[in-house]
Each structure stands twice: as C-alpha cells, then as structure tokens.
C-alpha cells in the first residue's frame, strides 16, 4: 500500500467524532502530557479548577467553565509555560449531606440511626461514586488536568490548612463565638450565611394589632408580617422624637394572648413615617430587633425549635408548625378583638438555597468570622499596583466585588452538620472553658469537641493555595505555582467564592491568589431562560457530546459569547459547529491524499510560489497574529471568528481549489511547493485550533508531516514575516473579487459556469494589467471564459453586465440575456452602497479625535479605503451613464 493510500485510510471519508475521540484522552493522560514539570527554567502558569460538588454529575455550566480553562492552559502549554491545571472536587457540606440522608430515608433509616461515624462512611462512599462520574465527564470533555495533583476539600492536606486558618484567625480575634440572629434553615436544621439565602417576592399580609397599655389608658398600634413571633416580643419601640408617643416612653403594654407586660422604649432605628411609627421588638427572631434589644438590655425569648415548630415558650401553641401557628394565632387575636385589620402585602422572603425552605431569622450560638479587617485589607490590595491587584475580566465586575466587600457583614461559619470540617474547638465538661487548637487537648476525656462543621466556603476560600500544600510554604509546588495565574468562574459566585479567596490569600500569604479572574455568565436556554429542573430545559453536556462530539460542544461554548455575558444554548448552533469540523476534516483529507508521502524534513517553502501560495501564507500570518492577540485577552469568541473565516473561506473555499491546479499539473517543483504550503498551513492551523478542538486536531496533526509526540506539546504558531507578501495578497484579493463578480453576474442571468462566455477586464493601469495577465490561469479556471481579454483601454460593449472591483472593471457581453433597465437598477443599488461607504469613511477622517488618537497605520488604511471607494463609485456612475446614453 502506498503512503498516499495509507493516509487516505487513516483519515476515513466521513468524520465520526465518536471514533476520533475514542481512546485519545487515555493516550494523553498515559503519556503524562498534562503533568506539570515544575521546571524552574520555565515560567509557571497555574489554573486550579473551581471544584465541582460531589453531589451529582456535571451540567452544561460546568462544561462551559472548564472548557474555557482548558483552552487557556492548552495555549499556555504550547507557548512554553510550565502549566499546572489542577483538578479537584468540593465536599459541598449541606448539599451532599442532604443527598446522603435522602438515600438513607429511601432505605428506611436515618443518620441518627447510624451515628456520626457510620454516617460519614456512607458520605465517603457517595463521594467516591460521584467523583468517578465527574472524572469520566472531565475525560469526555478532554480537560488537560494533572491528575497526579488532584485534591479534595476534605483530604488530609486541606484539612490541615483549614485548621491552621481557623486557629490563626481565632488567635487574632478574627474568629469568635457568639449568640446572634442568624439565617436558619428549619428543613436541614443548620445555619446559613447571608449569601446562601435566596430572596423571592411572596404574597403575604400585614397584620395590624392593638397592644393595650398596662394602665388601661389606651393602646398602641403595631403591624407585623409574622404574628407568630409576637409570642417572643420583649418591647415596643418608638422614635424618641415622635410627638405622638413621647409621653408613653417608659410605660408598659400588655402582650396580647401571653399577658406579659413589656416596656415601650425609644430608639432612633424606628421610622416615624412608616406605618403607625411603633414597632414590636422580638430580639430572638429578627436581626434588627436583636440590635435594638442589645441597646436596651432586653430579654431574648426564643419561641421556636430548630425544625420550625413552636417550643414551650409559645405556651398553648407548643408543637405547632410555625405557619400553622400563624393561622391559629391570627384567629385567636381576631377573637380577642386585638387584630383589627389584615392588609395584603407583597414582600421579599428569604429561602434556603439548598432546601428551598423559608429561612427563619433565629437566635443561635454560632461561630463567626469578623469580616471588616479582612475586607479592608483586600480592598486596599485592589487599590495597589497592577502587580498586586486582581484583574477582573471584564473589569466592570471589579465594582461588583468592591461594593460587596465595602458593605460586608460578619460571616457565620458554623453549620449543624456531620459532613464537613469539624470545628477545631473543645469545651471543658466541667468549667465550660473553650479550647481552640489544631490538635485535641491532652486530657481529652475532660473535653468535648464542638459537634458543628465549618461552612463549605471556608475550605473553598483556601483552594488556590491549600491545593498547593500550604501551609508548608517551603513546598516546591507552592513556591513554583503560587500565586496562580487565572481563575475562570461565573458572575453568580463572585461573593460566595471569589471574594473569600482574595481576602484569605491576602491575610495568609500577603498577596493575591490569582492574577486574573475571567468572569462568564450563565448558560440559558434558546429563549434566554435560566435552566432549571422545574422548567425541564436543562442540557446534559454528555448528550451533546454523544450526538455531535466534544469538539463541536467546546467550540460552540467557547466562541458563543463575549466575556461576562450569558450564553444561549441552541442545538442548531452546535450542529453548525459540527458542520465546521466536517469542513476541516474534508479539507485535511484532501491535503493528506495529495501529500504523496511528504516527510516533515521535506517541507520546502523556498521554491517559486504562486500568488495563491503567497496569499495563503500571508493570511496565515495575519490569522496567527489576530488569534494570539485575542486569546491573550480572553476574547475567545473573536479568536474563533478569525479562525473560522480563515479556515472556511480562505483555506477551504479558495486555496484548496487553487492548489488543485499545480497538484494535478505536470510541474513537479510546483507540486512540491504546493504540498509544502498545504502541510505548513494545515500544521499551524491545527495548532491554533487545538485548544478549542483538541480531539480532531490531534487526529489530523498525527497524519500530517510533523515533529513531536503530540500536538498537546507542539509549540504555539508564531508569525513568520519572511512568508508574508502584501503585494501578492492584494493581487489575490483582486482575483477573488473578479471571480466572485463573474459568478454573481452569471447567477443573475441564469448562465451556468459550464457555459463559456466572453469576459473583458479593464485594468486601471499597465502594472495592474500585467499582474492580471500573469495570473489569468485562475480566471480561466474559475470563470470559464470563451475568450478572456485583459487590457487598460477597453471599449465597454453596449449590452453587457459589469462589475467594479479594486483596480479593475469587468464586462460580460451577454446580448440577449441582459435587461438594460434591470442592469441600471442593479448598478444604482451598487452606487448607493459606494456612496454610503464614502460618506462613512469621510466622516471618520473628518473626526479630529480619531485622526489624532488612532495609530498612523489605521488612519492610512482609512485613507486608502476612501480612495478605493471613490474610484469604484465614479466607475459605477460612468457605467450607468453609458447604459442610459
């Protein structure tokens, strides 16, 4: 079998993504192509994967996020960096525990039946199962991860880092334990941080009540949306300057139903203009009331249990669910004549992000991080030099980050769970003394460890450095790969995660955790709706890969929007990308079939090149420059557009067609040059495309004459100025314009390309005529003239179709086929186009700001356009006059 036939067999006639992708990932991983070298002679480049939760399988948002990361790391590896793309997963405390408990319920048991240790064994089993699913999905996506350094937020090393941070912050007074109003999820029976609460507008009611004065002299009116909490009221507050109530301050009212007397206090917090100007104060069930209670030394009466039922302080309502209690207490207040009006009221109600339950403001003893000092340091870093600060891409998200940091509240970090990092605090069984340390107290039998665990985000906040073996700052990976270079994440977790990583890194390392944060949006459905289970509009990335291949999905995801914007998932766009891969496959197959066994060392670009050769090599250089510039700015959509136009239009539609002339000819030297150009251009194109479409590019590259084991390790293309030829490029552009014009005119008068017709081309000068004459072979081949005339002084035939291109005018005498009136109408439409182009460019050049600020070459390019457009306009005018004369 000849080598040419061998190439043909190795690249089948039909592109089959399943066959192309099969086994390729194992080849990369087994070859250790993704493993970071820790080579001190290379500049490091690090991305740590935003760790997916081990609660389920990856969704389309994960696919988008990780595809962008993989593109960046593949490019940097090809550019010569020592790249570390570090994989890992998050234990996801509340979410994973909820999943495991749900599974136990289905088996007829509970975590309490099992006990803590046995339950944790079940949780670890769950983790192992779902970690396996996630790794398979990473493989399907083709992610270039260094599995030798994979981490998990509950692994031993990260647990050490968590304890180190907790203890250090505690010793500095930045972690404290206190009784505060926190967000409580009655369904999962755990505290939530502020950003784990989702607010939804809910139709509720304002309940207007009369609290009678204890001395019987009247009453004071209050209103509430949560009448069940009145059982825990310990005061009524009014503004100290409110003339209506000044005389009542210090007096008492009798709490309806309960009968307890509570004081009327004065506090500046009360808004005199809202409602009656008097508010009930429930320090154990409202964060603002809690603060007022502190100022006035009020008792805190908790009336609910952790599961949202009423406790013994609720008297006869004990045991009722909080919402059932609301109904009952409203009826009783109405019967008592205290409740005099119920007013419908739409208000914002907090719901648990994890369970969906209505969040209860709840008095509880929890652990907190004192945020202001940490936030102040992080904000100060952001106001430093470019080498110190974190760069947000797009930069508008920096304002989002700073706004949150400047209005920060203390962070509740304890969770009433079993799955997570157990709080490293112990309480003395007799004295109640608190001990905090990385290790348990020596006389452990006298101490009891806190049963709570830390908020998942506490360990995730350390991810960029804990994964690199911090707190061992002498570790070689830590010294080489930290700080990391880029973080890729969605705008929806700037507060949850990005901000926390920044302030923790500043606090414990004195520097930013990453140089850049590339922010993307959400993947939405074709109608722009957020994907959700309730709408049933989610997309499984594995289904997309099964149908169209990973390369099609990756290219669509990475080029479908600009940084910071949402992305609409549309199946037809993925199919369009699949068609693009097919185009690449067919063009590559043609090239390989015509390589004639060309070896890498035989590639020779020094021979005489055709205008098409010069042009495609020039366009390749331009594409390398534009793609590199855009990927370095994370503008993958723009980079993809340049690649698409170059591959589809320039290479496939034009160069390959023109390459057939020498390839099917008799000139052996021309054949070698054309084969060399094909090999060189395809090699460099596959390299540029590789980070976007790793599988198909590896398959094609392996068939091409090449050096090296894998395209993964090939170098990123660089512009070779010696191969650029602007003059040849201009000639080729003119030839393409001529061929397109002739084809368009043929189509208008329904004259197929197979039918020979005379073609006359008038060049603008003798030099232009000579160049067209030199390249008339292309016009002969692609325009099929019965007779081709190229001159500088052509008498336009009376009945002819015409077209104006840069540097030439084309005439097609089509007597009997041409309708003069229609041709004049067509030319008038063309004249209108050139009038608009001239007006646009002249407006631009008359703008002093543009002329002064734009680079000189940009201004000169606009002036050249102006001259060209005016020339075309005048020639179209002249042709209209001829036809109408």
Image (cartoon, rainbow, N blue to C red):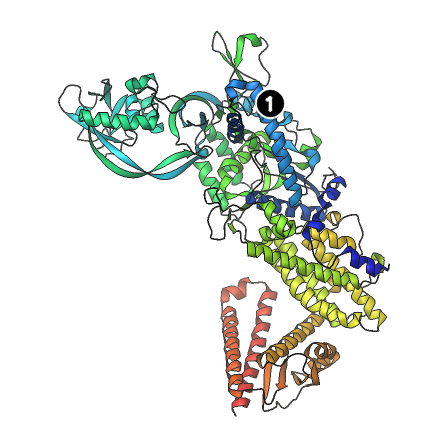
Residue found farthest to the right: 1
Residue 32 against residue 759 in the figure, above or below: above
Q: Residue at x 85, y 57 (%)?
A: 601
Please tell me which residue lies in front, 578 or 872. 578
Residue found farthest to the left: 217
The image shows residue 568 at horizontal and vertical percentages of 51, 52
Please tell me which residue lies in front, 626 or 785. 785
Left or right placement of residue 674 versus residue 564 in this view: right
Residue 13 against residue 517 in the figure, above or below: below
Residue that mark 1 sits on = 121
Left or right placement of residue 323 versus residue 631 in this view: left
Please tell me which residue lies in front, 463 or 319. 319
Instruction: Estimate how packed mark 1 is, as few (under 14), some (14 to 19) or many (20 or more) residues with alpha carbons within 10 Å.
Output: few
**Which quarter of the rendered picture does the N terminus lie within?**
bottom right
The image shows residue 436 at horizontal and vertical percentages of 54, 17
Q: Residue at x 35, y 19 (%)?
A: 311
Q: Label 1, secondary structure: give it.
A: helix
Quadrant for residue 471, please give it.
top right
Left or right placement of residue 326 versus residue 400 in this view: left
| Residue 467 visible in the snapshot | no
The image shows residue 293 at horizontal and vertical percentages of 32, 23
Q: Residue at x 83, y 66 (%)?
A: 672
| Residue 13 visible in the snapshot | yes
Residue 860 against residue 166 in the figure, above or below: below
The image shows residue 709 at horizontal and vertical percentages of 79, 47
Please tell me which residue lies in front, 838 or 3. 3
Q: Residue at x 63, y 62 (%)?
A: 645
Residue 289 against residue 494 in the figure, above or below: above
């Amino acid at each position: 079998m000849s080598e040419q036939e061998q190439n043909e067999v190795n690249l089948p006639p039909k592109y089959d993504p399943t066959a192309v992708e099969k086994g390729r990932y194992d080849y990369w991983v087994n070859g250790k192509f993704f493993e970071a070298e820790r080579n001190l002679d290379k500049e490091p480049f690090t991305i740590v994967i935003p760790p997916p939760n081990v609660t389920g399988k990856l969704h389309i948002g994960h696919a988008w996020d990780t595809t962008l990361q993989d593109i960046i790391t593949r490019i940097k590896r090809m550019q010569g960096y020592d790249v570390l793309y570090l994989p890992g997963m998050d234990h996801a405390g509340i979410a994973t525990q909820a999943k495991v408990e749900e599974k136990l319920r289905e088996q007829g048991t509970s975590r309490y039946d099992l006990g803590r240790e046995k339950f944790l064994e079940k949780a670890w089993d769950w983790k192992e199962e779902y970690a396996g699913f996630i790794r398979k999905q990473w493989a399907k996506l083709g992610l270039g991860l260094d599995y030798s350094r994979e981490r998990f937020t509950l692994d031993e090393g990260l647990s050490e880092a968590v304890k180190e941070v907790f203890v250090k912050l505690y010793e500095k007074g930045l972690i404290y334990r206190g009784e505060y109003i926190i967000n409580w999820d009655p369904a999962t029976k755990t505290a939530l941080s502020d950003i784990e609460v989702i607010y939804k507008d809910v139709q509720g009611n304002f309940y207007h009540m009369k609290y009678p004065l204890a001395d019987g002299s009247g009453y004071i009116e209050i209103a509430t949306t949560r009448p069940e909490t009145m059982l825990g009221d310990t005061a009524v507050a009014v503004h100290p300057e409110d003339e209506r109530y000044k005389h009542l301050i210090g007096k008492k009212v009798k709490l309806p139903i309960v009968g307890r007397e509570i004081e009327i206090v004065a506090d500046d917090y009360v808004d005199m203009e809202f409602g009656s100007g008097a508010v009930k104060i429930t320090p154990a069930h409202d964060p603002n009331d809690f603060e007022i209670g502190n100022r006035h030394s009020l008792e805190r009466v908790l009336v609910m249990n952790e599961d949202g039922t009423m406790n013994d302080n609720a008297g006869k309502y004990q045991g009722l669910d909080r919402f059932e209690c609301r109904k009952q207490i409203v009826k009783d207040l109405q019967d008592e004549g205290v409740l005099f009006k119920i007013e419908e009221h739409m208000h914002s109600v907090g719901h648990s992000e994890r369970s969906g339950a209505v969040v209860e403001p709840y008095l509880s003893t929890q652990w907190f991080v004192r945020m202001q000092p940490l936030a102040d340091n992080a904000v100060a870093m952001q106001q430093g030099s470019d080498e110190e600060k974190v760069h947000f891409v797009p930069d508008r998200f920096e304002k989002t980050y700073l706004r949150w940091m400047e209005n920060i509240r203390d962070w509740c970090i304890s969770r009433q769970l079993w799955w997570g990092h157990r709080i490293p605090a112990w309480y003395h069984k007799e004295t109640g003394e608190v001990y905090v340390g990385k290790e348990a107290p020596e006389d452990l039998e006298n101490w009891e460890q806190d049963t709570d665990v830390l908020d998942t985000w506490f360990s995730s906040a350390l991810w960029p450095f804990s994964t690199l073996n911090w707190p061992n700052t002498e570790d070689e990976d830590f010294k080489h790969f930290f700080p990391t270079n880029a973080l890729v994440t969605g705008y929806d977790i700037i507060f949850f995660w990005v901000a926390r990583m920044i302030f923790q890194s500043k606090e414990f390392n004195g520097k930013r955790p990453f140089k850049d944060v590339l922010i993307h949006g959400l993947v939405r459905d074709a109608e722009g709706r957020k994907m959700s289970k309730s709408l049933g509009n989610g997309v499984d990335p594995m289904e997309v890969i099964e149908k169209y291949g990973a390369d099609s999905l990756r290219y669509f995801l990475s080029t479908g929007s600009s940084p910071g914007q949402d992305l609409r998932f549309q199946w037809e766009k993925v199919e369009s990308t699949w068609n693009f891969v097919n185009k690449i496959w067919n063009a590559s197959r043609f090239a390989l079939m015509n390589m004639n066994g060309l070896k890498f060392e035989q590639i020779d670009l020094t021979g005489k090149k055709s205008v098409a050769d010069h042009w495609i090599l020039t366009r390749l250089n331009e594409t390398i420059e534009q793609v590199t510039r855009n990927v370095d700015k994370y503008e993958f959509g723009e980079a993809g557009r340049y690649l698409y136009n170059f591959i589809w239009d320039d290479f496939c539609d034009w160069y390959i067609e023109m390459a057939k002339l020498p390839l099917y000819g008799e000139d052996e030297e021309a054949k070698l040059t054309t084969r060399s150009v094909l090999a060189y251009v395809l090699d460099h194109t596959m390299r540029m495309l590789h980070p976007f479409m790793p599988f198909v590019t590896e398959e094609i590259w392996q068939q091409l004459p090449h050096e090296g084991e894998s395209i993964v390790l090939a170098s990123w293309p660089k512009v070779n100025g010696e191969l650029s030829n602007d003059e040849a490029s201009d000639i080729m552009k003119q030839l393409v314009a001529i061929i397109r014009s002739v084809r368009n005119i043929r189509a208008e008068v329904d004259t197929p390309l197979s039918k020979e017709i005379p073609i006359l081309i008038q060049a603008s000068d003798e030099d232009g005529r000579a160049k067209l004459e030199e390249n008339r072979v292309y016009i002969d081949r692609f325009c099929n003239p019965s007779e081709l005339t190229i001159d500088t002084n052509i008498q336009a035939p009376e009945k002819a179709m015409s077209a104006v291109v840069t540097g030439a005018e084309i005439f097609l005498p089509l007597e009997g086929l041409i309708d003069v009136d229609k041709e004049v109408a067509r030319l008038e439409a063309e004249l209108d186009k050139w009038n608009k182009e001239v007006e646009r460019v002249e407006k631009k050049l008359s703008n002093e700001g543009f002329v002064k600020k734009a680079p000189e070459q940009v201004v000169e390019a606009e002036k050249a356009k102006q001259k060209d457009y005016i020339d075309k306009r005048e020639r179209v005018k002249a042709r209209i006059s001829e036809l109408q004369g």
